[in-house]
Image (tube, rainbow, N blue to C red):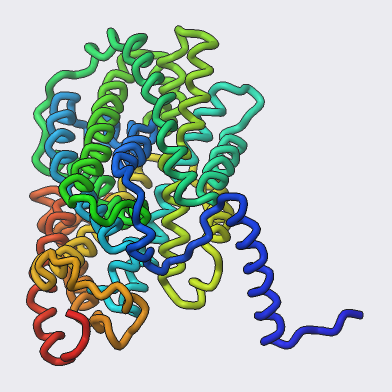
Amino acid sequence: MTPSLEKGDSETAHSNFFQRLTLLLRRWGVETHGIAPIPREERLDPRIYQLFLLWFSSNLNVTNLVIGAGGPVVFKLSFLNTAINLLVTDALSCIIPAYFAIFGPKLGTRAMVQARFSWGVYGAAIPSILNVLSMMIFIFFNVIIGGQMLAQVFNHLTPAAGIIVIALVSLVVSFCGYRILHWFEAVAWIPTLIGICVMLGVGGHHLASAPSYLVPSAASVLSFAATVAAADVSWCTMTPDYGVYHDAKASSLRIFTYTYLGLFLPSLILHVVGAAFAAAAPSVPSWNIGYDQGNNLGGLVSAVLEPTGRFGQFLVVLMALSIPGPTAPLMYSFGISLMNVSSVFAKVPRYVYAIIATGICIPLALVGQTRFYTVLVTLFDLVGYWSASFSAIVLTEHFVFRRCDWARYRVEDWNQHGKLPPGLAALLAFFGSSALVVPFMAQTWYVGPVAKATGDIGLVVGFLTGCILYGLLRPLEIRLLPGRDS
């Protein structure tokens, strides 16, 4: 018999196994870098335009149709009201994640690692855990939509089998890492753009049948805006992750502009298109049946393209297989965020977490295929609340206390608890801001006393109170605990 290993020997064996596997994967082109900041001498990639392509591809995706469709389906807004709402909300809310993208090339840090410069080493575990859960929520919905679309084309393929296919394709891209992700995103948007153009060409004449004007309540307008903003703002917890190898000397304005356009343009286009088809679906019997009261986006897309025959089916397949466009980055950031929770998790290679994310999302998606919109709106809003407070704290630290000076970040201290802020100000501001959000939130399971009159404005309140509380608490933290990074 083989002698049993002691605990230390077992850990050494596991470590040696991962080291050998990592070296092998590195030779095959798989990214094996962990969460340590990328040194400035390695941040040399001049292709800043890749940031535009990555976010353009991630957002020019059929999954974004769902967000816009929420206007007429969930909040009972007319197409005109929905479109105006989308234009204003997308234009404003994409500013925050676009600015966060600058941290990647300038500091070489992932989003959750950069958070340590305001939250501290241990405090940053809180947003990291929340980000892990958020990534899983978005992965969950993406694979459901992809599974529905594939099931519409192949008679013998169930939505469950389609979910597995989309999850596995996303796993392959995420497993390979940073460079393969950028390569994939450079082309993944093309099938969706073709499909959307054909949908508009085939079904455009039906869109006029949608109710053009309804008198909306202020509450429904603000609540819908909150859902859209939540989907946009939540990108801030991962946009820095995809610029850490790019040119550190690139201008901040250039990085911001590429990222902003990559987020805003496809989001607005897909949101408006989704709203248009969702608003018109009740007036077109085949669309209405396929859409299944808002629970089957794949059925709606398939019904719209049905007049084109096999070509339409081919487009549905291509659009479904493009869904890894947003899903693969989510899996990637899932692993990066989990590694930031604890030094124990950081010892496990990043690519292992891509497998874990896939193993979690498949059973969740299989269970959650029904009651699609009700669950979606609630979860998106919850992600938006915490993302708003998180971004407020990080941006206040950057603008107010570090005065937008990159030299004030001593990146070499990224994992030194005693040299970073203790994180007390960030934690108190975050939990205080979260508590203040409650009266202003509106969900199916709870409507705050203020939100009953105004609609859901929790995200705005979370951001503003996060800025104010952190701005007041951080100077006290610096005074009480001098000598820490500030």
Give the image location of residue 255, x and y in percent: 23, 47
Residue 183 sits in quarter: top left
- Looking at the image, can residue 438 be seen? no
Vertical relation: 9 (above or below) 406: below
Give the position of the C terminus as an image quadrant: bottom left
Vertical relation: 425 (above or below) 381: below
Q: Image point 22% across, 12% down: which residue?
A: 208
Give the image location of residue 448, x and y in percent: 17, 58
The number of numbered discs placed on residues in the rendered structure image is: 0
Q: Image point 29% across, 78% down: which residue?
A: 120
Residue 23 sits in quarter: bottom right
Vertical relation: 176 (above or below) 62: below
Residue 284 sits in quarter: top left
| Relative depth, front residue between 112 and 148 | 112
Q: Image point 23% across, 33% down: which residue?
A: 265
Left or right of 129: which side holds 5?
A: right
Give the image location of residue 1, x and y in percent: 92, 80
| Relative depth, front residue between 133 and 475 | 475
